[in-house]
Amino acid sequence: MNRLELGVNIDHVATLRQARYAQMPGAHHVEPSLLEAVRACEAAGAAGITIHLREDRRHIQDADVKAIRAAVRTRLNLEIGNTEEIVAIACAARPDSVCLVPEHREEITTEGGLDVVGQEAAIAASTARLQREGIRVSLFIDPEAAQVAASARVGADMVELHTGGYANAQGAEREAELGRLLAAGAQAAGLGLQVNAGHGITVGNLGPLLAIPALQELNIGHHIISRALVLGLQGAVAEMLEAMGLPAVARS
Ligand code: PXP
């Protein structure tokens, strides 16, 4: 059995950088550094780094893709929408894998899964094109039997099951969502697809997801970056106090 692995989505490191420096990308003092984030995630044991080059470039920029590709020592997973422009960029960037996701300009984050059933020909074409470049292809889908079956038909290597419905639900509804994920995982594995999962996963809701059959990789972003602020803020304040010549105060 394969060991479960963690891919860390670092888009929100870029979100923070863009909030301050979008208009001065080359400035000498731009921070936070995505490359430092890559190094920190890999040093902590992440098996991969995920970034999403969105059509609107709201966080990750084209230059980031190149720099991160060169820096990643584990595996780089590039999330993209299935458009000619972005698929061409992905082919040139040569990440280890591409995850095709649906993309809508107004959304806050990726909302539903990819409609593989409804766009079979277009997704099959992009899948084959990426695979010709030696890139493994994952499809981010809702845990629905028809989408899993279509993912196998278009020749994808992997599916990433959308766990957002599970993460957002509570009680009986969450149990139902979990049941859909377990069934989709079993179906995908039976069809020879690698089974990954992602979206909205936290330390608190992770446990039941580990029962997804053949689960190989979790891609987690928002929660890890949010927790990094809490876990790291005390150290950052202490560092500034020290630079100011002031004592760090230990208060609980
Ligand atoms: N997987 C995919 C395909 C995504 O689009 C996202 C969000 O960018 C994630 C995983 C990570 O989700 P979250 O930030 O909620 O952990």
Image (cartoon, rainbow, N blue to C red):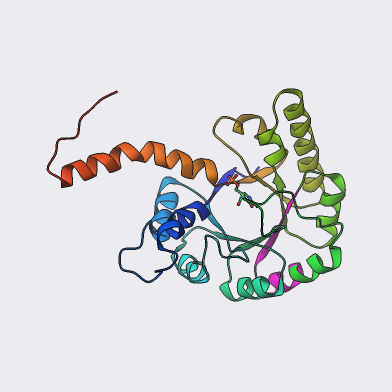
Name the residue rendered at 79%, 41% in the picture. Answer: 186
In the foreground, 243 or 70: 243
Residue 149, how many percent across, how many down?
86, 52
In the foreground, 133 or 30: 30
Q: Quadrant of residue 89?
A: bottom right
Q: Would you say residue 131 sits in the magenta stretch? A: yes
Q: Would you say residue 191 sits in the magenta stretch? A: no
Up the image or down, 153 lies above or below 207; here it is: below
Query: What residue span does the magenta drawing correspond to?
Result: 127-141
In the foreground, 214 or 118: 118
Name the residue rendered at 84%, 62% in the picture. Answer: 119
Q: Quadrant of residue 114?
A: bottom right
For the C terminus, which image quadrant?
top left
Up the image or down, 217 lies above or below 152; here it is: above
Residue 40, how many percent across, how many down?
40, 51
Name the residue rendered at 17%, 43% in the picture. Answer: 242
